[in-house]
Amino acid sequence: MSGCSKSGSPRAFPMTFLMKGTARALLPVLLSVLALWMPALTVRPTAQVQSLSPDALTRLTPHNTFERFPDGRPKVPDALLETMRTMAIEVEEAYGLLREKGYTNQYEASWKVLLPEKKLIGRAFTVQFMPTRPDLAEAAQKEADAKNLGRLRNQTTIDMLQKDDVAVVDLYGKIEGGTFVGDKLAYYIQKTTGTGLVVDGALFYLQRLAQAGMPAYYRGTHPGALSNAMVTGINVPVRIGAATVMPGDIVLGDRDGILFIPPHLVPEIVASAKTQRLRDEWVKKKFDTGKYKSGEIYGRPRDPALLKEFEEYTGMKSAPRPPDGPAGPAAGQRPRTEKPSPDKVNPEKPNPDTPAAAKPAGQTPAPDGRKPPA
């Protein structure tokens, strides 16, 4: 019978042939997809539950233009770090550019700050903790034993730090039992890295830490030791409050909070800060003369001669002032975008976005560009 196989099934041969042909056509595509994903999904046999191979970390930081550490972390050059420190770049100076570039989740406030007068600048070395789960902790410890690393704990990660690293520790806001270090291990960290600490958890022996001179950002303090928490990741992406942090990000901390800067944007941050400072210098020089109202200078200078002088002084070209409405941002300044209130970082510094009725009596916002004057 026409269209039947020897078994009597109609059109079995054509359908079988078609299915085999389709499979042959799709096989190269499937193999390509698997080849792309499998390396990133592979867990290396290391002392932590979760880790990234150097290749996987490289794929997750594709915009990095600098060298890398052997573990794959981007390595912003020492000279660039030193420039940031010498300039004492501020969080406010870097924040706008990050927002402009689409990095809207790099800022975190609401810290308690040890030695807030000291800026914190260095490369992020991320550590992730989770609440202890016995079976998972047991499996992680077996891997640590295979590497002769001893008991898997906070010191395992601390002993991996090197110069200019900043330990960025995700202890999920834990206070009691969430004390990452006290004075002795903090002293070791300071001597090893020359930087400081960011702990989404707790510290203890604060007076001794302050005397040692190490800046630190933390959520609270408790006299008890670290307990009921296990290390689950070293140099992996972590969440610190509202911020996403990648290994190798540049940590910038001051009284306004902390920024975690993607490495490839650091040169732009430095260049932008230099330009902003020229703008501020010119504006204040004009104010010093006593000849001008603030609206004539801060914003976009109205007088063509002043505008020309401003642009020559700063090298900035400013957009025309809108014909109606408020003056907007200062000439050459990026528009402000909202960020979480830094009041808990610097209680004496009021939040400029708080409604006037909520502000203490007699307090008015400083003319710093946060809002147009009333």
Image: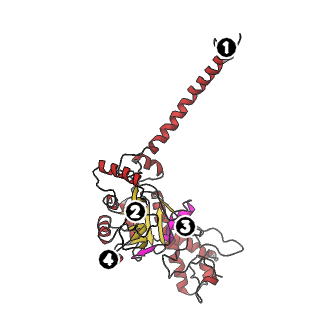
Is residue 91 highlighted in magenta? yes
Is residue 201 part of the magenta span, yes or no?
A: no
Answer few, some or many: residues within 10 Å of disc 3's Cα (few below 14, many 20 plus, some between 14 and 19). many
Q: Quick one: label 2, few (<14), some, or many (20+) residues within 10 Å?
A: few
- Give the SS element for disc 2: loop
* Relative depth, front residue between 269 and 300: 269
Q: CA distance from mark 2 to mark 3?
A: 39 Å
Nearer to the camera, 39 or 83: 39
Is 174 drawn above or below residue 353 in the view shown?
above
Residue at position x 59%, y 89% in the image: 362
Is residue 214 left or right of 349 when viewed as pictured? left
- Answer few, some or many: residues within 10 Å of disc 4's Cα (few below 14, many 20 plus, some between 14 and 19): some
User: Residue 8's spot in the image, x, y percent?
Assistant: 67, 13
**Residues at marks 2 and 4, CA–CA distance in whole angstroms:** 25 Å
* Callout 4 amino acid: Arg
Give the residue pinned by disc 4: 208
Task: Evaluate if marks 1 and 4 touch, with contact meaning CB atoms under 8 Å apart.
Answer: no
Task: Give the mark, 2 or 4, whose residue is nearer the N terminus.
Answer: 4
| Circles 2, 4 touching at the beta carbon (< 8 Å) | no
**Residue 234 visible in rendering:** no
Viewer-nearest of discs 2 and 4: 2
Q: Which residue is mark 1?
A: 8
Q: Position of residue 72 (x, y in %)?
A: 39, 50
Display colour scheme: secondary structure
- Disc assigned to residue 96: 3
